[in-house]
Image (cartoon, rainbow, N blue to C red):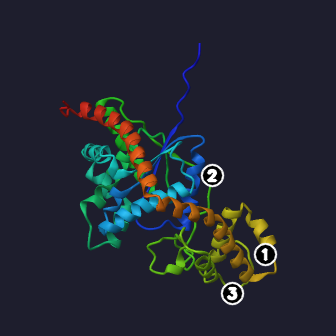
Amino acid sequence: MSETPLRKPRILSGIQPTGTFTLGNYVGAVRNWGALQQEYECLYMVADLHALTVRQEAAALRRQTREAAAMLLAAGIDPGRSILFVQSHVPAHAQLAWVLSCNTQFGELSRMTQFKDKSAKHADNVNAGLFTYPALMAADILVYNADLVPVGVDQKQHLELTRNVAQRFNNLYSPTFTVPEPYIGKTGAKIMSLQEPEKKMSKSDTNANSFILMTDDADTNLRKCKRAVTDSEGVVRAADDKPGVTNLMSIYGVLTGKSFGAIEAEFAGQGYGAFKEAVAASIIDAFAPIQAEYARILADKAYLDGVLSQGAARAAGLAQRTLTKVYKKVGLLQL
């Protein structure tokens, strides 16, 4: 008698289409997503609805949504093994978000530190969507009954809220949602700003020399690495009081697989000039094949839109089953 094969654990992750991904996005998330496809059932989402909490230029958002999808494909997402889709193409996300909002307390949302941070950053547009953002994030996860969610430090609080909302709903209406766990992968480097290495690398930084984009050409990469803040010691070694050098070592280490000890030995007595050139070369080598594939995919609009259309259909099939159960349990009439 044959046994029913066990379903692979399901992972859901997403990224906003608010501009080209940085080296930090690549190391912290995108690079790892391709590897997860071996062991997990993966759903990857371009989170365009979340992007609306900040004012967007319509044509730019549409373009950046396609670009984000193309970059994910170029970086290793296989649409044959994973589901790649655009969030707004699956209406169940927004539909479930309303039900979950009605099962989330005002006090819970008001404690979210990201709301406070983003409100301060966008003081001229503190909208309700910014406040209820965690309810939509909860819907993104729970509508697929995801088992695991890769989260960074800035999203841990939101995932905990998702877990609380799922448990509350399950207790009120009977078991409905899988309560997701955080996915803790292999510890990767946290990539910091090249100009202010105490801060995380961010594409929203006003100083373009502080971040490296996945689309930056070789000359730009080299220039930004050469301008990276270091110190006056001139010795390549990792230390808390050498954040700039340590950050460059983290980048070089994660892209080459070398330990800090090996890097220190490799550049002993060479100073920062040779080291910065080597860091730039490692970035260029990592991004060159991705950039070539990205250009090819972007040029084939029919292929890209086909992948997204098929991904949305597959995602919607899973999501609708959950939404139908939820609607029935809360008492919404379905004909």
Identify residue type, mark 2. Answer: Lys
Q: Where is residue 84 shown, x and y percent of the image?
A: 45, 48
Residue in front for this viewpoint, 199 or 33:
33
Q: Which residue is mark 2?
A: 186
Please report the residue visible at 54 percent of the width from the left and 51 percent of the height from the top.
77
Q: Earlier in the sequence, mark 3 or mark 2?
A: 2
Q: CA distance from mark 3 to mark 2?
A: 33 Å
Quadrant in which residue 95 is drawn: top left
| Residue 73, numbered label | none
Please report the residue visible at 29 percent of the width from the left and 43 percent of the height from the top.
96
Identify residue type, mark 1. Answer: Phe
Q: Earlier in the sequence, mark 3 or mark 1?
A: 3
Quadrant in which residue 271 is drawn: bottom right
Foreground tag (3 vs 1): 1
| Residue 232, numbered label | 3
Residue in front for this viewpoint, 83 or 125:
83
Please report the residue visible at 69 percent of the width from the left and 87 percent of the height from the top.
232
Q: Is residue 152 above or below residue 36?
A: below
Q: Which residue is mark 1?
A: 267
Quadrant in which residue 146 is drawn: top left
- Label 2: few (<14), some (14–19) or many (≥20) C-alpha neighbours in 10 Å: few
- Label 3: few (<14), some (14–19) or many (≥20) C-alpha neighbours in 10 Å: few
Q: Where is residue 277 shown, x and y percent of the image?
A: 70, 78
